[in-house]
Image: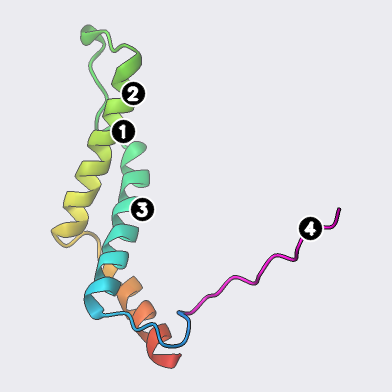
Amino acid sequence: MELPPIPPVQTRPAAGIARSDADLHAVAKSFEATFLAEMLQYTGLNAMPSGFGGGPGEEAFSSLLTEQYAKLLAERGGIGLAERVFDILKQRTSDA
């Protein structure tokens, strides 16, 4: 049995699909928040003191708190990554 070929990945929006600036800003902020969450995981930001005992759920909930911190940082200006990503996305959509 032969599998069908895999379609190529589109790097630009298909013709006729217009992205608004608000959509591009949302994507850029989301990207920056994801990046910040990954960076914050290694800072020990949510490390609990050993006196609390932890438990199996601590690690899961700690990562959720880190994600929320990252979203807040991105919404309040972040590190400037969202603006750069927005500029690149805007340029790519205008070139199409």
Residue at 25% from the left image edge and 66% from the top image edge: 26
What is the three-letter code of the residue carrying label 1? Ser
Badges 2 and 4: C-beta atoms under 8 Å apart? no
Q: Residue furthest left?
A: 76
Mark nearer the N terminus (3 vs 1): 3
Badges 2 and 1: C-beta atoms under 8 Å apart? yes
Question: Which quadrant of the figure has residue 61?
Answer: top left
Q: Residue furthest front?
A: 1
Distance between the alpha carbons at the discs numbered 2 and 4:
41 Å
Question: Which quadrant of the figure has residue 20?
Answer: bottom left
Where residue 84 sits in the image (x, y, percent)? 32, 74
What is the three-letter code of the residue carrying label 2? Glu
For disc 4, the marked residue is 3
Numbered mark located on residue 35 in the image? 3
Residue at 33% from the left image edge and 26% from the top image edge: 60
Q: Residues within 10 Å of mark 4 (few under 14, many from 20)?
A: few
For disc 2, the marked residue is 59
Distance between the alpha carbons at the discs numbered 3 and 1:
13 Å
Distance between the alpha carbons at the discs numbered 4 and 3:
36 Å
